[in-house]
Structure formats: structure tokens, C-alpha cells
């Protein structure tokens, strides 16, 4: 049985590249996003709701890391989102944090019915700061807001923590499809903003050159002014 | 004026409305000339200049300190392109435009006329030449784009166009036309305003006519021009300025005071040395200025002059800097960059016997690419420093020669001497003394993370410094190749002897650092695991010895014979030790014809796509675990042998295994391969081999313990065909067997939890650590994952591929907790999946990976499991990667560390120089940001791990940009140091720094107290010393010189100052022009008299109301 898996894997691998290449050309930008948070907060469900618009009460607990792809449009540009879904168990931290680098956006998720998952947000945030790119955008998401009866984390607390950490904040329900799309759209907007910002800020680097030439111009100006 | 009035018979310009102007351009049948004028009109209107502009008087030095704005637009005169440019001083405040409605009240000077007569901005230190010559803060300029305007008729045409356009639009801004060759900077111009018209003319000659080489002559000329020669009562104001040049600072002022010692340079591997090879401050220009003298008080004619620069009311100096002086930091880096363009492989360079011709080519290339070749850098070796002031030499050769001198290389010009190389290697690998200094970047994150470099003081960092020094001082790319070879050889030795690398932490690769650093961290992890294993094996060896000997005796021959025939995989052949583990592949286990199959497999895998290999491995590992009960027996008999591993050894084991398998297990396609071996097979031959290959053991995580439980294989055997459908039942069935099993590999208790079905505490097992990965490996894995596609199947395969460590953890858990069930495991591993006494729904999904993996997991403590992280193989991968780098790639890999080091040095300087160079820290920040962006986004590794990707042309140019910025920053540092040195006798450090800062920040600095102040005295001393030197050199002709000297300093017995390099005069007057009944209108003559240039810029105005 295990060997079968191997064969299957090889097959899909062999057949995929061409497919993939064709698909690859169908976008203008690709953003890599990462969903993180404690185990059982609903990361996989959230992702499936967004990517497939489907919901199942029980997805197999993610082993390691997995992903789904969704293409969206922003200002007439096709943006391919490669959204990586991670295992929340403590034991998988080292594996998943390795994927932080290169992620342009993070969805940090907790479960509004679970105090512990909320308490871990700070830790996750530290992990992001340690392992991700400086410019990565983070959205804090309190999931399972359909389960109002079991709520233990008030919206206010979530909002407060998000403000404190400088993250965007949403309460969502993958089950009832509340705010799921909005979370991704907002995150993509933020990333786009950041991108154009960093392009804009590039000219400041150009200023250095200006400074350089100015100073050299000084010298030449001197020469023309006095020794002529 | 009247002849220039446009035929359109417009009203006076001030009354023009914009609508009417548009009518002008709205004709269809216009001549080229008219079209040309129309274009100018349009531009003037676009820029809102079609009105009377009046502004408050200029502030002092506003022409220099203010901000200039330029706007330009293309023009075309019958297809000949021109450009019209507006140069305008930005008025920060009080901007107001006045329509000259009060025209009737009184005759009023236009703005340009007032500015021309304004004395506050004479001789601006930095301004457009037209502004400087004519005293303007706003003007329009027509320049031809291609061919200069040479003919008189064209000039007249352009000039009248300008005049007409100005009149058409009522614009009172002067407009100029550039004529003659561009380099001559000759302009003529025109300005018009109600009641007044001004013409601008220039004279440009190579030599100064004797008649006009003094104020007297110039005055005469102006009078003649105005037709007022006979009017002595005219009042002239004269501003004068004499400029003196100092090119030799003399022994007191020379910088660097001490030329960097080539020997020190060549023998210092700790850090990079700083300093420059020549003075970045090349010249001092002293300007003696008389801002205001009245014309009739001046005596300055062909026989006598009363201009005495030492008594001038104002002294100011400006400095000329050399941008291309070689500074050491940039020198290291640019030389290093040259290597990045080389194409040779390491082997090419190491085996090159005659470096001579190659060296010549290299030099030619050097010359082409060397940004410093223009400058000939003088170097004064210590021995010669006393005599001649400057010895012109190529510093590179000189430094290399110096380097050779210390290493006393006799043969092989481009080589490091062996003992020097040995010392370098010793230094690189010496223990870290934690001598790292503050390496934080400006925003608090670690600089080496920002630049993706390596921690200061680390092995990687030292290597980079040594490489860049070796490249500069010990023979360029050849020496670099040697160093690299020695470095990798040393790494190999460290690995073989299981000695951990010093100065590198034993932690998984830090993805925020350079790929090279990650690779070295990875290697260190491997070495650490290896040494740990060996230590444990050594302690266990004694116990096992007896058993080993016994078992060895049983059947020693069988496999040894076969081993000879096996192909050795050519994975780094020349390095001796070869990873054997590659051979243990799943397919191999299944192959019915053992011997050939194994050989073929070995070759195939080595030539195969490396990325694919990893995928296979994952699966392979799973399989291997399943067969591990057999292997445990291998393990048990494995002492700590010291022999070197060979691939044959591994092959033998595998072969033997296959054979046994073929005999004993049914060749069932699926299940047969992973069915367990008969554990009672004769262990003799294997154990013998195993004893030879303990280092290559790739099957087990750790091997420190004896196989202590016979029960395990028994249990496993029954489990070898697990039923997927009913795992719970199976667990229940196996429960009794687990209970018999002795617990193994416990770490500690998991809180107070107890097993669900046993009255035993729940233990956390000792688990295998996850395999560390470098970024290229990680990327490759991510790519494999993403290639599997966004499908359910893909997702399942991915999960399967990643379940290795889950299985390992489950097995360890089972071993530590006999009688446990999946619920127990979940309570430890994923507590939230155990709710209210049972598994969460998702864990109960039939056939989910957690359940299937659990059912296939057998109780095996971590130390007896197959290693998840195959350190032997990973170590080889790293060495393979390093060995195959080309010198160009080595350079690229090392560059981030080198940039980091230079940045740290610059930052250190910047804090020292803060009082005089406050602009340096921001500059460093900019360099840091830029380098950070560059190195962060630079993907060194290809999509296939262990593949280095060189710079793209774009990346290369960005790297060069960063290096240029570093060079510039360093140049600034040296300027500041040079000036500090030159003016050190000013007094307190604070005073010196303030003055130096002033000099660096302003194009021209006025000296306090003129010639007699402290600053003036230092300047005088520099000139005096220079004069004395000149005097000494020209001694025989002294008398001659003095008689020839110009009249400017005839009374000086000791000439403090040399002949002025240039004299400038501005003569102004208000005079009635063109006739005696005209208004008094401004006239201005600017003259510069230099040795090889004579230039006059004259503006003469006429009253247009009263001719």
C-alpha cells in the first residue's frame, strides 16, 4: 500500500509539469499566503470555504503543510493566490515556520470558542516576526463566529489584540461563510498597497544617487566657476 | 526696439489677454519662423510667464542656497530641434506677481534689472553660469539639440525670435540663445519690459587682451560701449574676486598621513583595513573678495595694482574632491567583483601550471573593468617615503608585491605560499572568541539577517574576509581557488574526524542567513549527529564486543565476494567517503535479481534528477521503517568501527538483504517487498560488514543501545499486513502483546495523564528531531508539493509524504507506552482532538492518515528507528555543493558577508565622524536598505537543491550600485578625515569638527577674520609652504619669475600667494542710455581673466521711451 502511494506520487509528478506550466502563465502576480494558528481552529475549513466554497464539518487534521490555489482579480490583474495551510500542532512548528519566509501575507487564526487558541496568538505573532519577511501583512481572524453560544473570546478582545499587534481583524465563520472572502480580499489589498509603496519608496534610494551627483557637480561647478 | 515689434501690431504686452494669444497660434498658413515663435509663445503661456513679474530683493547667497527649478519643452525650427528651458529660483515665500498697472506712476526697473544691480549675490558659489555672469534669478534659454548655432544670420534669427516672443507675451524674463560650440558656453540674450530693453552679449577669448587685463581697461571698454567715455562723473561699482589655487598640500597637510602598509593589508585577516591611497581632497581654491569698490578709487592698470589679497575684506575657500581616489574598502570589493565575472572552474584554476599568459589577459580585463584605472594612484612605500613625494605606481601590483614580500613566494606567481595558506585555514577554523561587535541594523533586527549574511565572527564571516583579502593581496582568483580548495578539504577532514566546526552554532540552518552559512550549519548539524553517534557507539562498543566476536565467527565469507563486483556510485569519487544510503531504495528491495538490480539502481539514482530523489526517499523511509525489525539485528551487532565507509560496504548489506529476501519472502509485487524478513537468518556476514561500516549506517536514528526486546519483531511480524478497515479492533487485538512489551524511549510523563485502557501514566516519548533543511532544499520541497497540484489526490500525496515524522512519533509513542491507543497519542500530540472522552470527529474519519499511520506504526523507540535525518548523506550533499562551486560563484556567495563587514566599518566610522559628517549615518542606512533588498530577493539557489544560480545582469548592476554607494560613503569618510587632519591646528576638536563640517556641507566657506583669522592663517601657511617648494624647485629662475609676475602683488617680499589663477570683476553702473535724456538704466559687465580664458558678459539696457 505504501508503495502504491509512491507510484502514484511519481505519476502525478510526471504528468503535472506540463499542466502546471500552462496554468502558470495565467496570472500577472502570484502571492504566497500562509494560514497559521492553533490546532482545530478551522484553518483547513476556512481555506476550503474560500477556495472551493465548500464546507465539511470534519477535515482530516493537516499533516505538515498543504496548499490550495485561487485566482482573483485586482485592478485588471490576475493575482494567483497560493494559500498554504499548516498543521497547528506544536510538533509541526519547526516544519511550518520554515515556510514563513517568502510568504507575503499571513492569516493568523484563533477559535472564538477556545481561550487557549486566542492566548497563543501572541506566540504566533512572534514567530511571524522572527521568521517572515519584514513586509509581510498579517490579518488576525477569529473563526467559528457562528458558534455564538460557546463563544469565550469577545469581539472586543480580538479587536484589541489586533490593534495592539498592528494587524487587521475579522471574525469569521467558515461554516456559515461569514467574512471569509473579505479576509482574503483585504489581505490582497494590503499586499498590493505594500507593493506599490515599496515601489514608490525606491526613488528615495535614487536620491542617494542624486546626492552623489550633486556633490560631484559641486566639484565640477567649482572648476567652472573659478579656474576658468 | 521699434523694428523688432511684431507685425501683428499688438497692444502693449501688459494688456494682452490670454484669449488673444491663442489667436496667434491659431493660424494655418504660417512660415517656419512664425511657427517657431508661436511655439515659444505657447511655452511662455504654459508656464504662466506672460505677465509682469516682480519679486522682493534676493536674500544673501540666495542664488546658491535657494532651490532652482527647471522646466523645458522641445521646439523645432523647420525640423531643426531646439529646447527651451526655464531656470527659475524657487521663491519660498512672499511670492507675488504684480501686474504693472502702476506703470504710469514712475519709471520702474524690471526684476532682472534690479537683480543685476544687486550686490548681495555676487560670485555665487554654485549657480548656473548665466545666473552667475548676469546676476539673474530667472531666465529662459534656447539651446540647439544637435548642431551648434554657428552662423551670424541664424543667431540673429533666433535672437529676434526671442525678442518677438517676449514682446508678444509681455514676459519680462530674459531669454538667451546658446551660440557657437557648446563647450564655449556663449550666450546672447534679450529682455524687455515696459520702457526698458536689455541686450546680453558675451565675449570669449583664449587670451586676455593686454589692454583690458585690468579694471582700468575694463572700465574703459564699458564706457566706450555706452558711448560715455567723456563722462568722468559716472559712478561705477566694482566687485572683485581673485582666486588662488593650491594643489600640493605639503607634508603637513598631506593625507593619508601614512600610506596603508601593504604588508599589514596582506596579513590582516580579521577585518578589512580602511584608508585611502591618495588624498581625496585634491585642491584648495582661495578666493579673496572685494565686494564693493567704487570705480574711481581703484588703481589697477597695466603698471600698478592696489589689489592686495592679504588685505581683501573677505576670504573664502572651496575644496575640490576626487571621487575616484582608491579607498581600501571599495578596493577590496571591486577587486572581488572582478572575480565574479570569471568563467573558470575551480579545477581549471588549481591545475593551471603557467599563470603568466593568463595573468596578462587578466590584467587586460582588469583594466577594462577597473573603475579606478583612470587614476594613477601614487603610493609611497615606507622605505621611500622620506624622499620623493609621490611615486606613481599601480597600487594593485604594488600591494601584491608587498604581499609577496611577506609570504616570500619564489615560484608560482599567483599562488599563496603553502604555509601562509595553512595559517589562513587555521585562522578560519580557530575557535570563536566571541569578538563580535554590535551587529544590529538600524531598526534593531540583526544586520546579518537583514543582509542575509552571517554573524560576525562566524566561520562563514571569517571565510569571507579571508577570501576578499586573499583575492586582493595574494594572487586574485588563483589564490581564491586555492583557499577554497583548502577550505573544503578542511571541512572534509572535520567531517571525517567528526570534529564540530568551531565558530558556527549547532542549530538547524537559519533561513535568514546566507545560503553558504546555512550549508555550513547543515554540515555542522551532520557532524554533530555523527559525533554523537560515534561517542555513544564507542561507549557501547565494549559491551558489544563479546557478542560481536561470537557472531562474526559464524559466516564471514558470503557477501564479501560479491561486493567487489558492485558499481561504486560516482558521487564525489575523489573524496573517498561515499554515501551508501542512497542505495537503500524501495524498488531495490523488490527487485527479484538482487545483484544486478542493485548495481543498476545505484547508477540510475546518481544520474537521475536530484529533485525526484527526495520524493522517493520519503517513501523509501517509510518502507525502511517497516523492515527495520530485521535491521535491528544489524544494529545490534554494530560496534563502533573506525574504518572508512565505502559504498561497497553498503551495497553488500543491501545485496545480502535482497538475497535473503528473495529466498525467504514471496515475490509478491506489493506486500512482499515490505514483508518482514525472517529474523532468524544468519546474521554473520552482515554483521561483519556492519562492523566495517558503522559510519555509513543510515538505517537508524541512533544506535547506542542493544536490542533489548525480542518481542518487538514478533509483534511487528503479526502486524505486517495491517487491516485498514478495522484498526480499533486490531489495536484491541494487539493490546495484549503490547503489554508484554517493555516500555522504551520515554522522555517524561505527560502531566498527570494516564493511559485510557491501562493504569499507567502517559509518557512523552523521546522523538526524532525533524530533518533540518537549507532554503534550497525547502524550496525544492515546496516546488515538489506545488507540482502535485491543487487536487484532493495531490493533497493526499503531500500528506503522505510528510507523514514520516508522524509515523516516527507514533512508533516512539507506542514504544514508550505499552498498551496505548490512538486516543492516548492524540491526547499528547493534538489535545484538542480528544474531546469528552473520545476522538474528535475528524480523527474518526475512516481511513484518515492519522488512523492508518497509527495502525501501521509499530512500537519502536526513536533510537532504533530509521533516521529521518540522514546526516551522512546530507553532509555529502553539502560538500558536493561546495566542491562544485566556481570561483565566480564563490565570490557571489561570499559577497553579502563582505558588504556586511564594510557596512559595519562605515558605521563605526560614522559614529566617530558624526560631528563633522552628520550625513553619513543616513547614507549608511540607505546602503543598508538597498543591500538588504538586493540580498533578500536574490535567489542563490535554483529550483533544484544544490544548484547555485549566478547573478542576473540586473542583479549584478544592483550589486555594483551598492558597491558604488559604499565607495562614495568611504570617500566621504576619507574627505572628512583628510580635512580634520589638514585643519587640526585650528584648536579644539570641537572647533575643527565644526569647520570641517562647514567645508563638507557648503561649496564655499568664508573664513572668519579673512586672511588674518585662525583659519586664514592655516590656509596662508599651506600656500606659503607651497610657494617655498616652488621657489626651491625653480631657484635658478627666481629673478626672472619675479619680474614677470603680474602687478597684483608687487610689494610682497615673500610671496605668500601665487599668481591668481583667475580674476573676476563685476562692474555696475546706472547710466542714461541710449541718450542723455533717457532714464538711468542698469548696465553690468562681468569679466573673468584667467590664464587661458578671457570672458566678458555684458548687459546693456536702453530706455525705450526716451530714445
Image (cartoon, coloured by chain):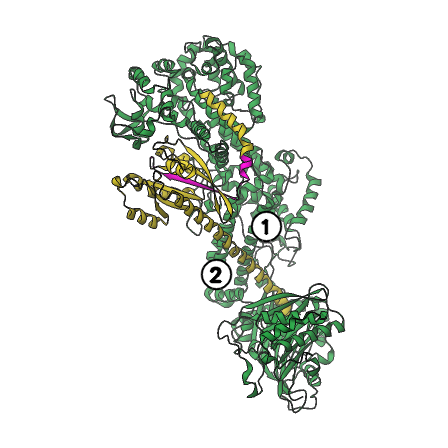
What is the letter of the yellow chain? A
Find out whether residue B882 is within the magenta segment: no
SS category of the residue bearing label 1: helix
> Is A160 on the left or on the right of B662, as rendered?
left
Q: Is residue B849 above or below residue B1054?
A: above
Is residue B561 toward the left or the right of residue A102 in the image? right
Residue B764 visible in image = yes
Residue B972: x and y in percent read 54, 58
| Residue B492 in view | no
Q: Is residue B827 above or below residue B25?
A: above
| Residues at marks 1 and 2 on the same chain | yes
* Mark number displayed over residue A138: none
Q: Answer with the quarter of the image where residue B223 lies.
A: bottom right
Callouts 1 and 2 close, C-beta under 8 Å? no
> Based on the displayed image, in which of its 4 quarters is residue A219 positioned?
bottom right
Q: Is B444 or B958 nearer to us in this picture?
A: B958
The residue identified by callout 1 is B331
- Give the mark nearest the N terminus, 1 or 2: 1
Where does the magenta region start and end?
A: A20-40
Asked whether B671 or B121 is in front, the reply is B671
Task: Identify the residue at horizontal 68%, vertical 46% (top origin).
Answer: B365
Q: Which chain is green?
A: B
Q: Where is residue A61 in the image (x, y as percent from the top left)?
A: 36, 31
What chain is tagged by disc 2? B
Q: Circle 2 is placed at which residue position? A: B918
Amino acid at each position: 500500500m505504501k508503495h502504491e502511494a509512491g507510484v502514484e506520487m511519481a505519476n502525478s509528478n510526471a504528468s503535472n509539469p506540463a499542466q502546471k506550466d500552462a496554468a502558470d502563465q495565467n496570472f500577472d502576480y502570484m502571492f504566497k499566503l500562509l494560514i497559521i494558528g492553533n490546532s482545530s481552529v478551522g484553518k483547513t475549513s476556512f481555506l476550503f470555504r474560500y477556495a472551493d466554497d465548500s464546507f465539511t464539518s470534519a477535515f482530516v487534521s493537516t499533516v505538515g503543510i498543504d496548499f490550495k490555489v485561487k485566482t482573483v482579480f485586482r485592478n485588471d490583474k490576475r493575482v494567483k493566490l497560493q494559500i498554504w495551510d499548516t498543521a497547528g500542532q506544536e510538533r509541526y512548528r519547526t516544519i511550518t515556520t520554515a515556510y514563513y519566509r517568502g510568504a507575503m501575507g499571513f492569516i493568523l487564526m484563533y477559535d472564538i470558542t477556545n481561550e487557549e487558541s486566542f492566548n497563543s496568538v501572541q506566540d504566533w505573532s512572534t514567530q511571524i516576526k522572527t521568521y517572515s519577511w519584514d513586509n509581510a501583512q498579517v490579518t488576525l481572524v477569529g473563526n467559528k463566529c457562528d458558534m455564538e453560544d460557546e463563544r469565550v473570546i469577545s469581539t472586543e478582545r480580538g479587536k484589541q489584540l489586533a490593534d495592539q499587534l498592528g494587524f487587521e481583524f475579522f471574525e469569521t465563520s467558515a461554516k456559515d461563510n461569514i467574512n471569509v472572502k473579505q479576509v482574503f480580499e483585504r489581505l490582497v489589498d494590503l499586499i498590493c498597497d505594500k507593493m506599490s509603496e515599496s515601489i514608490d519608496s525606491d526613488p528615495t534610494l535614487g536620491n542617494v544617487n542624486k546626492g552623489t551627483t550633486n556633490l560631484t557637480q559641486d566639484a565640477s561647478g567649482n572648476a567652472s566657476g573659478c579656474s576658468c | 526696439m521699434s523694428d523688432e515689434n511684431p507685425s501683428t501690431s499688438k497692444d502693449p504686452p501688459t494688456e494682452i489677454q490670454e484669449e488673444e494669444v491663442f489667436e496667434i497660434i491659431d493660424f494655418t498658413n504660417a512660415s517656419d519662423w512664425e511657427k517657431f515663435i508661436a511655439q515659444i509663445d505657447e511655452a511662455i503661456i504654459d508656464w504662466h510667464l506672460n505677465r509682469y513679474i516682480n519679486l522682493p530683493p534676493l536674500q544673501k547667497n540666495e542664488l546658491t542656497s535657494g532651490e532652482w527649478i527647471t522646466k523645458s519643452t522641445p521646439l523645432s525650427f523647420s525640423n531643426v530641434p531646439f529646447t527651451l528651458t526655464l531656470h527659475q529660483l524657487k521663491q519660498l515665500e512672499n511670492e507675488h506677481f504684480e501686474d504693472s498697472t502702476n506703470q504710469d506712476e514712475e519709471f520702474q526697473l524690471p526684476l532682472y534689472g534690479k537683480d543685476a544691480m544687486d550686490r548681495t549675490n555676487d560670485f555665487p558659489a554654485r549657480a548656473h553660469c548665466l545666473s552667475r555672469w548676469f546676476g539673474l534669478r530667472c531666465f529662459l534659454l534656447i539651446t540647439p539639440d544637435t548642431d551648434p548655432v554657428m552662423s551670424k544670420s541664424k543667431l540673429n534669427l533666433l535672437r529676434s525670435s526671442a525678442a518677438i516672443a517676449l514682446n508678444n507675451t509681455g514676459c519680462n524674463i530674459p531669454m538667451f540663445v546658446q551660440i557657437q560650440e557648446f563647450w564655449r558656453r556663449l550666450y546672447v540674450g534679450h529682455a524687455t519690459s515696459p520702457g526698458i530693453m536689455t541686450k546680453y552679449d558675451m565675449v570669449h577669448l583664449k587670451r586676455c587682451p593686454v589692454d583690458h587685463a585690468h579694471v582700468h581697461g575694463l572700465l574703459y571698454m564699458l564706457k566706450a560701449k555706452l558711448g560715455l567715455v567723456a563722462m568722468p562723473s559716472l559712478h561705477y561699482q566694482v566687485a572683485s574676486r581673485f582666486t588662488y589655487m593650491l594643489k600640493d598640500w605639503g607634508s603637513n597637510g598631506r593625507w593619508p598621513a601614512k600610506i596603508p602598509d601593504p604588508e599589514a593589508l596582506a596579513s590582516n585577516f580579521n577585518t578589512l583595513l580602511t584608508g585611502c591611497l591618495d588624498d581625496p581632497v585634491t585642491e584648495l581654491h582661495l578666493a579673496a573678495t572685494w565686494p564693493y569698490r567704487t570705480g574711481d578709487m581703484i588703481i589697477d592698470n597695466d603698471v600698478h595694482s592696489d589689489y592686495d589679497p592679504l588685505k581683501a575684506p573677505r576670504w573664502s575657500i572651496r575644496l575640490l574632491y576626487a571621487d575616484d581616489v582608491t579607498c581600501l574598502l571599495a578596493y577590496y570589493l571591486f577587486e572581488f567583483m572582478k572575480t565574479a565575472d570569471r568563467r573558470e572552474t575551480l579545477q581549471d584554476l588549481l591545475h593551471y601550471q603557467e599563470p603568466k599568459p593568463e595573468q596578462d589577459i587578466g590584467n587586460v580585463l582588469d583594466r577594462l573593468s577597473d573603475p579606478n584605472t583612470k587614476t594613477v594612484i601614487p603610493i609611497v612605500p615606507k622605505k621611500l617615503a622620506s624622499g620623493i613625494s609621490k611615486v606613481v605606481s599601480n597600487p594593485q601590483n604594488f600591494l601584491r608585491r608587498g604581499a609577496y614580500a611577506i609570504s616570500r613566494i619564489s615560484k608560482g606567481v599567483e599562488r599563496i605560499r603553502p604555509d601562509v595558506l595553512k595559517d589562513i585555514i587555521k585562522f578560519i577554523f580557530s575557535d570563536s572568541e566571541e569578538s563580535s561587535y554590535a551587529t544590529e541594523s538600524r531598526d534593531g533586527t540583526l544586520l546579518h539577517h537583514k543582509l542575509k549574511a552571517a554573524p560576525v565572527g562566524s566561520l562563514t564571516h571569517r571565510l569571507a574576509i579571508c577570501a576578499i583579502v586573499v583575492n586582493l593581496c595574494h594572487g586574485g582568483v588563483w589564490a581564491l581557488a586555492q583557499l577554497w580548495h583548502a577550505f573544503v578539504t578542511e571541512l572534509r577532514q572535520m567531517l571525517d574526524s567528526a570534529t564540530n566546526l568551531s565558530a558556527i552554532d549547532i542549530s538547524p540552518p537559519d533561513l535568514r542567513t546566507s545560503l553558504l552559512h546555512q550549508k555550513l550549519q547543515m554540515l555542522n548539524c551532520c557532524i554533530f549527529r555523527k559525533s554523537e553517534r560515534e561517542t555513544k557507539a564507542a561507549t557501547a562498543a565494549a559491551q558489544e564486543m563479546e557478542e560481536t566476536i561470537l557472531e562474526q565467527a559464524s559466516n564471514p565469507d558470503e557477501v564479501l565476494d560479491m561486493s567487489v563486483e558492485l558499481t561504486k556510485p560516482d558521487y564525489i569519487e575523489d573524496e573517498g567517503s561515499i554515501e551508501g544510503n542512497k542505495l537503500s531504495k524501495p524498488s531495490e528491495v523488490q527487485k527479484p535479481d538482487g545483484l544486478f538490480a542493485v548495481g543498476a539502481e545505484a547508477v540510475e539514482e546518481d544520474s537521475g534528477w536530484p529533485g525526484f530523489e527526495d520524493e522517493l526517499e520519503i517513501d523509501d523511509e517509510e518502507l525502511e521503517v517497516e523492515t527495520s525489525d530485521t535491521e535491528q539485528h544489524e544494529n545490534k551487532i554494530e560496534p563502533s568501527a573506525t574504518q572508512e565507509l565505502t559504498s561497497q560496504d553498503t551495497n553488500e548489506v543491501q545485496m545480502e538483504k535482497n538475497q535473503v529476501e528473495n529466498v525467504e519472502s514471496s515475490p509478491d509485487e506489493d506486500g512482499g517487498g515490505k514483508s518482514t524478513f525472517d529474523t532468524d537468518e544468519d546474521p554473520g556476514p552482515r554483521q561483519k560488514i556492519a562492523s566495517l561500516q558503522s559510519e555509513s549506517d543510515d538505517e537508524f536514528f541512533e544506535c547506542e543501545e542493544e536490542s533489548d526486546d525480542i518481542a518487538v519483531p514478533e509483534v511487528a511480524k503479526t502486524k505486517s499486513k495491517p487491516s485498514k478497515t478495522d484498526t480499533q479492533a486490531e489495536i484491541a487485538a494487539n493490546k495484549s502483546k503490547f503489554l508484554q512489551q517493555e516500555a522504551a524511549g520515554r522522555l517524561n510523563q505527560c502531566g498527570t495523564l494516564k493511559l485510557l485502557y491501562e493504569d499507567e501514566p502517559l509518557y512523552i516519548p523521546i522523538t526524532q528531531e525533524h530533518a533540518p533543511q537549507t532554503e534550497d532544499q525547502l524550496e525544492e520541497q515546496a516546488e515538489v508539493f506545488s507540482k502535485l497540484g491543487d487536487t484532493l489526490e495531490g493533497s493526499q500525496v503531500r500528506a503522505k509524504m510528510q507523514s514520516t515524522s508522524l509515523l516516527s512519533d507514533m512508533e516512539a509513542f507506542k514504544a514508550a507506552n505499552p498498551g496505548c491507543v490512538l486516543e492516548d497519542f492524540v491526547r499528547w500530540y493534538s489535545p484538542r482532538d480528544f474531546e469528552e472522552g473520545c476522538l474528535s470527529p475528524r480523527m474518526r474519519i475512516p481511513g484518515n492518515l492519522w488512523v492508518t499511520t497509527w495502525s501501521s506504526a509499530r512500537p519502536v523507540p526513536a533510537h532504533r528507528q530509521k533516521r529521518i535525518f540522514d546526516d551522512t548523506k546530507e553532509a555529502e550533499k553539502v560538500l558536493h555543493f561546495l566542491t562544485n562551486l566556481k570561483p565566480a560563484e564563490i565570490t557571489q556567495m561570499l559577497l553579502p558577508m563582505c558588504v556586511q563587514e564594510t557596512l559595519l566599518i562605515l558605521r563605526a566610522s560614522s559614529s566617530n565622524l558624526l560631528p563633522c559628517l552628520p550625513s553619513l549615518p543616513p547614507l549608511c542606512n540607505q546602503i543598508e536598505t538597498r543591500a538588504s533588498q538586493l540580498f533578500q530577493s536574490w535567489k542563490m539557489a535554483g529550483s533544484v537543491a544544490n544548484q547555485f544560480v549566478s547573478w542576473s545582469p540586473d542583479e549584478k548592476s544592483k550589486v555594483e550600485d551598492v558597491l558604488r554607494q559604499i565607495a562614495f560613503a568611504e570617500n566621504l569618510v576619507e574627505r572628512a578625515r583628510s580635512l580634520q587632519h589638514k585643519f587640526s591646528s585650528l584648536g579644539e576638536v570641537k572647533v575643527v569638527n565644526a569647520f570641517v563640517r562647514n567645508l563638507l556641507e557648503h561649496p564655499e566657506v568664508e573664513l572668519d577674520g579673512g586672511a588674518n583669522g585662525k583659519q586664514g592663517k592655516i590656509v596662508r601657511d599651506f600656500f606659503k609652504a607651497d610657494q617655498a617648494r616652488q621657489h626651491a624647485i625653480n631657484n635658478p629662475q627666481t629673478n626672472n619669475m619675479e619680474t614677470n609676475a603680474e602687478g597684483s602683488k608687487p610689494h610682497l617680499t615673500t610671496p605668500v600667494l601665487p599668481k591668481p589663477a583667475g580674476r573676476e570683476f563685476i562692474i555696475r553702473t546706472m547710466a542714461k542710455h541710449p541718450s542723455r535724456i533717457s532714464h538711468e538704466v542698469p548696465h553690468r559687465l562681468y569679466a573673468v581673466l584667467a590664464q587661458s580664458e578671457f570672458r566678458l558678459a555684458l548687459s546693456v539696457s536702453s530706455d525705450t521711451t526716451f530714445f
